[in-house]
Structures are given as structure tokens and as C-alpha cells.
Image (spheres, coloured by chain):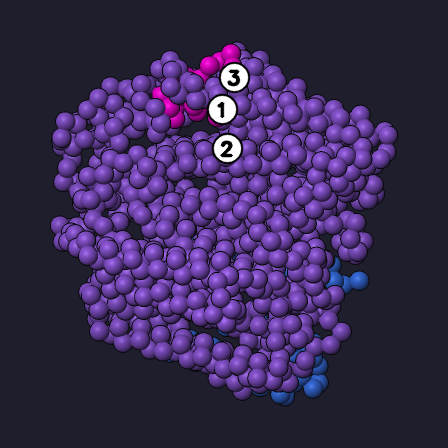
Chain colours: A blue, B purple
Amino acid sequence: MDEEKRRFNPIPVWLAVLVSTGIQIASVYKLRQYSIVATDTLILLIGAFEVTLIGAYFMHLKFEQKSLLAVALIPIFIVGAMVFGILASVVR
Amino acid sequence: MIYKSKMGEEELAPVVKSRPSSQTAFYAILAVLVVATAVLVDLNYGTPAERLVFSEVVIIWGALLLLYFIFNRPFITTGESFRKTESWVKRWLYTTNHKDIGILYIVTALFYAFVGGMLAEFMRTQLVVPENHFLSPLEYNEAVSIHGLVMIFWFLSPLAFGFANYFVPLQIKAKDLAFPRLNALSYWTYAFSGLLVVSAFFLPGGDINGGWTLYSPLTSNTFMPGPGPTLGFAGFTLLIGSITISSINFIVTLVAERGPGVTWSKIPMFTWFILFTVVQMLFAFPDLLSGMFMLIADRLAGTIYFTSTAGGALLWDNIFWFFGHPEVYIVLLPAFGAICEVLPVFARKRLFGKNAILVATFALVVPFSFLVWGHHMFTTPIPPTEKMAFMVSTMGISLPFDVIVIAWLITITGGSLRLKTPFLFALASIVVFIIGGIAGVFLASVPLDMLFRGSYFVVAHFHYVMVGASVFGLFAAFYYWFPRMTGRMYNEFLGKLHFVLSMISFNLLYFPMFFLMDMPRRIVTYNVPSWALPNLLATIGAYIFGAVQFILVANFIQSMRNGPPAPANPWDADTPEWEPEHVFEEVNGGFTTTAKITPALGLGAGNSPPMAKTPAFDALRSSEQPATTTQVGPNVVVRHHVSTRPIILSGGISIALLGLAMLQYAYLGLPILGIGATIAVMAIVGWAWDDMNSVFRIPEGITEKWPFNQISRLKLGMWSLIFSDIILFATILTADAYIRINSPTWPAPNTLHPIVLGAISTFILLSSSPAAYMALDSIRRGSTRGMLSWLGVTLALGAIFDGFEFYEWWQLFSQHMYPSTSNALTTYFFTVGIHATHVLIGLLVMVYLIIKGLKGGFTKSNHEAVEMFGIYWSFVDALWVFIFAFFFLL
């Protein structure tokens, strides 16, 4: 791909990641007292959002061929199977 | 074909002046001082305090050696000096050529087969009669464990990858693997890692003795103390590193290095199966790697992953078998690929259902192999629902194998069969695989598995699959490709004798074990009369099976020396490895390219006549690496690109691991660790120096790369590495979560780890990703100064982040909180430590990039390394997002 098309302004992405982290931290202080499960879920979802931003922009996945993106789903599938399978063996 | 370089003359390898002999002498004296001091310490000379001083002296000598190397580069040699070298030994030590490395893998794998085979003979001798005392219980346990490990990891897979190294590039018309030096590094780390594991027999504590599955807590310091087992685990970990590098190399080669016209539909079956294998390796082995890191941390750093009740045996079982079941297919699939090559050639028919085989393997076997591990744990207390799910998935995975076997049988049915040795072994492989496979279906059933688990029925099953199907398939490959590798034909009579005796003795060895379904495996002796006969028969079979393998070795040695010259294509095969290849040659002092068959061993008697002669000296100089030369025929010299770095780096790491294993037990551990680390650092610096000066450069050629046409070789390698690292960290965090769920108490957020401290370090690290991007953006615009500035900012932010982590560690230590204190601290220290190591590696890479940038190594059009670094660094940042959440917020 043309190098010019791969350029972007990193500041908004950076701010989005930092603000997201701030929301995660704030949720520990403000929301956890009401529901631990909901707060933890929110923190993990925001974390996934941050990782998606980092992957898309700073790891350039947004600008790569879609085939690479498709291949990146393989480890996610395997990780999903592993997490589900291993943690399921704790639940008795 | 001439690999024309796109580079200009200014990118030629620089000429380095010869170093003065005085420097060499200084270097040698320093090395002697290091060794002498280390020996003095080893001899326990003086009081403990004096020995400690000696150790420190060795470290200082080692540091001097390192400094000397950095500033004088004593190991840096020019391509010219290699070109003058025609040393046979140097060729094999320094080669990076895929054929040479393939041969090295095969020979080394046979050596380890001998080691593993001898251990098996010891075991069978112990069990030949009831109440035998040939081996002590500990020796027997060591023999069982190391036999399993060596045969699976140092014989079966490496033998297959010997063939893969040799033939995959030929089958896809690539000039070599994508990263030849990494290929050599993979080989040498493999070879040395095996030596570490075997040498552990001679250290205090003996070798690993908890079975090849390394079941916890048998592997803990409590039950398996001493430096010997630790060294065994360290060697195994080194092997996993080798395998990961190799997987990445093969994936990139297969995806991005296929020759012009070699589209996916034209790839031969063996290469397809190697692709399936390396994909599984890439995703399976990082899981085991993280398990091994935890295991070694438990032994050396006091963590309690596998010794606490929260983690313990079930956590290890899950981690090991998540890797362990794909490993069965990793061992099996290359043999399947070879069978797919051999059957149609000797049946003189096309392979039936080629696409069905490929779809069945790639769409079902590969992904499902990661979904069936629980069937190895039916006798553990995992929930019944989970057992049912794994039972269904395990039975389901047998279906694609039915498709494969049926396709093979239809292929040979009605064919005009040639009963040559390769075909006979391929046929034998199918027969024993069917027997082993059917036995495996029994074990997929929960109630039957409860009966058979831990008995000799299981031993028979997996030996029918692993030894029968896999080894016989690879023997078929051996005989099939022998003429291509050596230029000679093997002795057919000896080949058939080898087949007949192997088949008989194999079944004599393993079939009686099916009847020992009530005899527990791994017991050192027995006194049940009904077990005596099957054990006696199995032992006789073992002796014969071991002995007849020398027929194979004798046949090959004799045939390589005196066998009749092989025709260029003795089997009338239609796959590309039998076609003439285009090589650089030096004929009577002049360089030409010619098309011919060039065996890595032997005299090349089957060479086809030269098809083209083109003056190619200039192209050679601008695109090839430093080379040695080998005489393969009258006036014909084949060039081999070489590097000293892989063997030195592997050797250094191995010595360092030896020191690491001895650290807790002997003063000598620290100096050995220092010496090994020094050698390894020297090699890494040399490697970086080579890259900085384009000494070993492989230009991107014109290749088939669909569906990754716009993605470079290096980027594919980087993403493959990241994929494997994702599995590594996912395993660690899953283990952390497992322990957390199982722990009766866990510190609430902001009690053990202050959120403010974590938040500051998180903001710092997350700010470094945009800085790394700005460095890339600067050099894209042609601003070297901008790039250097932003790299400096990234470096500073990364260093501050690591500083914060070490500060928090220090704070915890000062409050007497160590990895062994609690489950929470075990997971924290280990996970953050692994992440901090990733950051540290990134910092070192940045130092390299900055030095290269200062020397003008990056331009507007040449800055791929900066982009790759940015991807890696951002990945490390992304990992921290989850680690921060897990330890500070949840």
C-alpha cells in the first residue's frame, strides 16, 4: 500500500487509549461497590477496546491486507478454546 | 536462475581489515583466564568465601571479554575469508544452506534415536522377567522419561524436519528458507538442547524422572531435587525456542518464498503437510513454553504455580495436554505427507481425493487438535459435562483420518504396484496406523478410558501411532529421497530385509502390550505371572527391532560410498524436487549458473547435463552471502552461504543454561552462567553487526505470495512471532486466572498493588506506542533526525516503565513479600517479570536501531526494521493493558 495512505494522526488514538484507561480506573473506585462482576466485565471490555485501537493503528492492522487480519483470528480462536476449556475445569 | 539484486553497488558487503594477531592473542589469554578461574572454583579450592571471590573474578574476566568483543569484534570475518575456506568441518558448522541443515537434522535425529532406543532397551531388559533388578527404580524412571522425551522431541519431529529442510524449498522452487541464519540457529539450538537433556544424567539429582509428560508436582524441587532435572527442563525449554523459530521460518517460506508459478494448487502434498504441521507447532508450543517457564520459575525463583493447591497437578495437566494432543499430529503429519508422495508414485496412479485430504486435514484435524486435550484427563476431577464435550470432540477428530486412509487405499487399489522399499514402508505405516487409530477410539470413551488409562494398552496404542505410523512413514521418505540426497541408489535387498524384520519385530514388541491392559505403565517391576509372557515377547521384539535398524544405517553408509549412480529421477516422480535446479557454480575459476541435480551428499552422479551457462559473477557478488565452497564433481564447485553466529549463539545459550541449572547448588553455576551469557551476547552483537553492515543479506525475490502480496517477508515473520507470543501470554494469564479462581482469598484492588503507581506506569507505556509510530512516520518522510529523536523518546519511556516495575518489586521485597509468599504474588511476579523481559528486549532492539540510524542505516525507502519494531513494541503495550487490568483493577 502507498506509504502516504498508511499515515495517520496518532494523537486522537493515543488520547482515546489514555481516556479509556482512566475510565477503567475510575470504575474501580466508583462502580465496584455496586457490582464486582459488572465492573470487572466493563474493565475487560474497555481493555479489549484499547487493544483493538492499538492493534488497528499502532500495529497498522487497519492498513494491512485483509488476509493478514483474517489470519490474526486464528490465535484468537485458539486462545478462546484454551481459556474456556481450562477455566471450565475449575468450575465444579 | 540468477537472483539479480535490486541493490546498488554501495550496498555490497564491506571489506573488513584483518585483525592483528596481538588482538587474537589477548582474546585467547582472556578466555584461558576465564576457564582457569572457573576450574579453580570447580575444584573447591579454598574456603567458601574464597570460592565466591573466584566466581566474581570469572565474572569480571567475562565482562572484559565482552567489552573486548564489542570494541574489537574478534569474531567478525569477511565473506572473502570464508570464500577461501574449503574446510569440510567449517562447512558443516557454519552452513546456512537448507540442504546441509536438512542433512544435519537427519544425522542428529538418528543419533538421538540411538540414545532414546538404548534407553528403551534398558527398560525392556528391566521388564523381561518378573522381579528383575537390572535398573534401580530411579534409573528406570529416568530411562522412561528421557526415552519418551528424546524420541518424540529430538528424533521424530527433527527427522521429519530434516526432510522438510531439504525438500520443501525444492518443492516450492525457493532458493532457500526465508531466514537461512535462523534456520541454522534452529538446528544448533536443537542439537545443543538435546545434549543438555542427556548430560543431565551425569549431574547431581539425575535426569528428569517424572515421565515425558512432566507431571506436576513430581517435577517440583520436593520430589525431583538437584541441578540435573533443572538442566533437563532448561534443555527442553531451549528446544521449544528452536521449534518456534523453525515454525516461523517455514511459515514465511511457504507463504512468501514460493517460486514464480508455484501457486497453492501446485504445492506437493509433503509440503502441504509440513505447512499444517508448522501451523500447529506455532500455536501449540508457546503454550508448553509458558508452562516450562512456570515450572523453571517454581524450581529456581520460588513461585508456587504447580506446588500450591490452587494450581497444582490439574493446572499442569491442562497446560501440558493443550499442547500434547496437537503434538501427536505434529509428529504424525509429516509422515502422512511423505506417504502421500510415495503411494501414487509406486502405484503409478494419481493420488485419489487430494483436495479431500487437504480439506480434511486443514479444516478439521488442525483446528480440532486444539479442542480434544481433555480426553487425556478423563481420570482427573474435571466436570462431567466437560468430559462429555471432550469425548464427542475426540471421537469427531477420528473422522478426517478416515477420509485420509480411505483416499490412500483407493489410490493403491487397482494400481500398477512397484513393491519397492519406500512403498512397502508406506503401506506398513497405513496398516499400523489403522490398528493404533482404532485402539485410540477406545480411549476417547470416558468409561473405557477409566479402565485403560495408565495401563500398557495406552502404551501399545500410542506406539502404534507414533512409532508405527510416523517412523515407518519417515522410513518410506528416507528410502524414497535417498537417491536425491546422495546421487546413489540404495541396496534394495537390504531395504526389503529391513522392512520385513522391522514389521515383524515391531508387532512382536507392541502387540502383546494390548493384552497387558491390567498392567500399570511406569512400574519398575512386577510379580503377576500372567504378565510374564507378554513382557518377554515384547522384550525379544524390542531387541530385534533395535538391532535391525542398523541394517538401515549400514545400507545407507555402504550405498552412499559404493551404490550405483542414481538416475536424475529414479522413480519417475512428477514433483519439483526431482527437476534440475538452478545453482551457482564455479567452473574452472569462472562463475556460471547451471541447471542440475545437486545432492548435498555424495558425488552428484545423477547430475543432468548443464542446461544453461550464464556469466553470473556480478549478480553473485551483489546478492549472495559469504560462502564456502564444496567440490561435488570435476571442476564443479557448489557455494554454501555461511555464518558463524548461529552455532556460537546456541553454544553460548546452552552453557548459560548449564550455569543456570547449577546456580542453586554450586559456586561454579554463576561463572558458567556468566561465560555462556558472554558468548551469547558476543554472537548477538556479531549478528547485529552483520545486519548493520549488510554482510548477510538476502534480497526479496519475485515470488508467489498470494494472499499476502503486499506484505513483506520480514513482516510475515514478525506477525507469526506475535501470534505465538499471544498464545504464550494467553496461557500465562489463563493460569493466573485459574489460580485466582481456585484461591480461597485474593487481595482486593489497591491493597497489594497501588493503583496510582500502576496507572502512572501504564500511562507511560501507552504513550510510547505513538512515539514509536512517530519515529516511523519521521523516517517515512525522510527525516533521520526525527526518527532518532522519537526512538529516543520511546526508549526513555520504555526504560522508565521498566524502572517503575522494578521499583514496585523492590517495594514488595522490602516488605518481605516474595514469589513464594502467596498465589497472588506468584502470579504477579512471574507475569510482570515475563512482560518486563519483553520490554527489555524492545529496549535493546531500540539501542540497535538508534546506532544503525546514527550510521545512516535507514532511509526514506529503507526503514522496514523501524516498522517491525513499532509493531512489536505496540504489541508489548497491548499486553500490558490486560496485565494492568488483571493485577491492579480486577
For this view, does B737 lie left or right of residue B386? Answer: left
Disc number placed over residue B553 in the picture, else none: 1
Q: Residues within 10 Å of mark 2 (few under 14, many from 20)?
A: many
x, y percent for residue B446 = 80, 44
Residue for badge 2: B110
Q: Indicate the chain on which mark 2 is placed.
A: B
Callout 1–callout 2 Cβ contact below 8 Å = yes
Measured from the top left, where is residue B420 in percent x and y?
51, 15
Residue at (34, 24) in percent of width and height: B602
Return the x and y of residue B225 as percentages of the image width and height: 65, 58
**Helix, strand or loop status at disc 3:** helix
Nearest to the eye among marks 3 and 1: give it: 1
Depth check, mark 3 against mark 2: the one in front is: 2
Q: Disc number at residue B46?
A: none
Q: Amino acid at mark 2?
A: Leu
Q: Identify the magenta region.
A: B478-494
Query: Any magenta on residue B792?
Result: no
Residue located beneath label 3 in the image: B495
Looking at the rendered image, the quarter that the N terminus of chain B falls into is top left
Residue B489 in magenta stretch: yes
